[in-house]
Amino acid sequence: MSGRCAMTTESNSTELPTFELPVERSAALMRAVWRLLIVTIIAIVLLSIRPDWRLLWLTDRASLVGLGVIWTGMLLTTAMLAYSAGRWITLAVWRRPVGIRVSPEAIEMRLGPFGERRYAWKDIRVSLPESVDAELISSMPDDAFVPQLRHPAEEEDLAILMLRFSRTRPEALTRLLRPYMAWGMQRSRHGN
């Protein structure tokens, strides 16, 4: 799939566009490959360090503890990266449809092993980066900023999540979200 998005306009009271961003499966596979490469390197390092544990126990317990801590840390890191790689590989081969749909009602994310999420616009706080003046937003190019979309149920910015999974260029996402930014800013000014 390419990073293009389909955009349609549905009629509703606010006349906001509906668009879909496909999940970039090749990017998910690439993320998995990079993680597996790091897992392989750590595994090679772990297998090449072959201390005599019994001798260390008898002669130098501080080194034994130090090596044990290093080994444990490397094993935990390897396990976490392998788990993460497995999720990204699973997303790359997920059989059901995956993607992100932005509509006037909600942002819906179908992300395979990463879960299905729905964020209603009434709960999303739309804001701009501190360096962007809201009065000049209409004259700014799309590549100058990415809006911030915060939801109480999510620690991370929804715009960043959309960029990560869809591999849409930031300026394309900003262009698609401009009507929602104007609507969200107007809504926050009126206290709705």
Image (tube, rainbow, N blue to C red):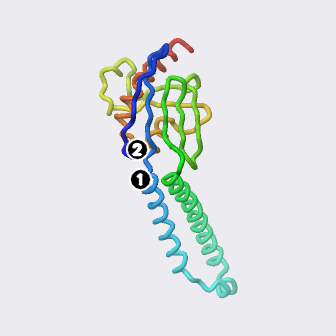
The image shows residue 27, relative to residue 102, as above or below, that is below
Rendered view: 134 above or below 20: above
Residue type at the position of mark 1:
Ser
Q: Quadrant of residue 54?
A: bottom right
Query: Which numbered disc covers residue 158?
Result: none
Q: Position of residue 53 (x, y in %)?
A: 65, 83
* Distance Cα–Cα, label 2 vs label 1: 10 Å
Q: Which residue is mark 1?
A: 26
Q: Dots 2 and 1: beta carbons under 8 Å?
A: no
Q: Position of residue 28 (x, y in %)?
A: 46, 52
Q: Give neighbour class at mark 1: few <14, some 14-19, many 20+ (Cα, 10 Å).
A: some
SS at mark 2?
loop
Q: Is residue 176 above or below residue 3?
A: above
- Name the amino acid type tagged 2: Arg
Mark 2 burial class by Cα count in 10 Å: few <14, some 14-19, many 20+: many
Q: Nearer the viewer, residue 90 or 131?
A: 90
Q: Is residue 101 left or right of residue 114?
A: left
How many marks the image carries: the answer is 2
Q: Residue at x 55, y 59 (%)?
A: 86
Q: Give the SS element for disc 1.
A: helix
Disc with the residue nearer the chain's start (2 vs 1) = 1
The image quadrant of residue 22 is: top left
Which residue does the image show at 53% across and 51% down from the upper left? 94
Q: Pick whichever, 102 or 144, lies toward us.
A: 102
Where residue 66 appears, x then y in whole percent?
A: 61, 73
Judge by depth and name the residue closer to the eye, 34 or 95. 95
Q: Which residue is mark 2?
A: 167
Residue 108 spot, x, y in % from top left: 54, 34
Left or right: 189, with 3 as reference point: right
